[in-house]
Amino acid sequence: MLGLALFGCKTGVAPDPNDPAEAGVMGPDVLQQNLKGANEALYQRLLAGEIDEQTYKKYIEQAAEDILEKSPIDRLSPTEAWKYVEVLRTAGRWRDTAQLARVAVDFAKKSKNTDRWVNDSLRLAQAEAMLGNVDTAIKDVEAILGVGDTDAAPILLGVYLEVVPAARGKGRDAELAALTEKAIACQMRTKVNENSEAGANFIKARPTHVSRAWGLVVDLLNSAGRRQEALAAAERGRQMMRSL
């Protein structure tokens, strides 16, 4: 089931066929394509009921790990770091994910690529949270909260679906609640092209994501023992949902 055709070469550098160290080396684009293929095959089996969700997760992590065995991570270019990050996080290799995500974030800032900066910062924050570095994860997210209205779209989903689940229960739930509420504000001010399919889908899904995120804020405050703050947050959430 997990047999994959692992062929390719490093981006921009042809492998030496006489060098055993280069045999089978794959570039980041090939890595992503192979992981996508493995994921699609396994997801179809999940939908068909042949495997359960836990088995699906186990197999896709193993597939990512197998793919990474053929990759030249120690020789990558900073321009390609984010591509390896996607495979590493799928494999659950959080320490490597954090290391390369930091490279990707630094390069995105240096090259003034705001879209990559936002997305790579969210990946970095998730990895740091998984490693138990919750304060660092919060700072990584806070660094991108001030981006422009047209660049803020990924923030809420990255925070409430990935960063917070990885960070909660580690002594900073109240701070995570505040972070989630800030991410909600980013979602509310985000501007998209409503005439495009992606923009229309964003607007359509916004009430659902905002509602669920407010529920998470209340949940986090309750788990932190902040009962009165949780009640106040619930009321703020109700008022915002009425506006939507």
Image (cartoon, rainbow, N blue to C red):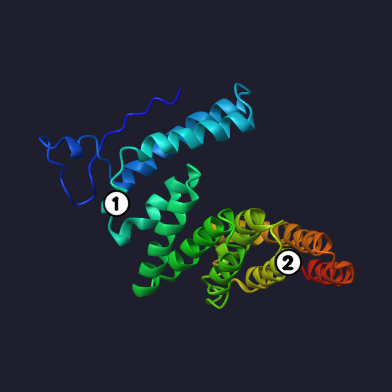
Marks 2/1: CA distance? 37 Å
Q: Quadrant of residue 19?
A: top left
Residue at (35%, 74%) from the top-left corner?
110
Q: Is residue 194 visible?
A: no
Residue at (61%, 58%) from the top-left corner?
163
Secondary structure of residue under mark 2: helix
| Relative depth, front residue between 29 and 219 | 219
Q: Quadrant of residue 7?
A: top left
Q: Is residue 85 above or below residue 135?
A: above
Q: Mark 1 highlights which residue? A: 74
Q: Is residue 143 above or below residue 160?
A: below
Secondary structure of residue under mark 1: helix
Q: Amino acid at mark 1?
A: Asp
Q: Is residue 236 visible?
A: yes
Circle 1 crowding by C-alpha within 10 Å: few under 14, some 14–19, many from 20: few
Q: Amino acid at mark 2?
A: Ala
**Percent position (x, y) of residue 33?**
37, 40
Q: Is residue 67 above or below residue 14?
A: above
Circle 2 crowding by C-alpha within 10 Å: few under 14, some 14–19, many from 20: many
**Percent position (x, y) of residue 171?**
71, 62
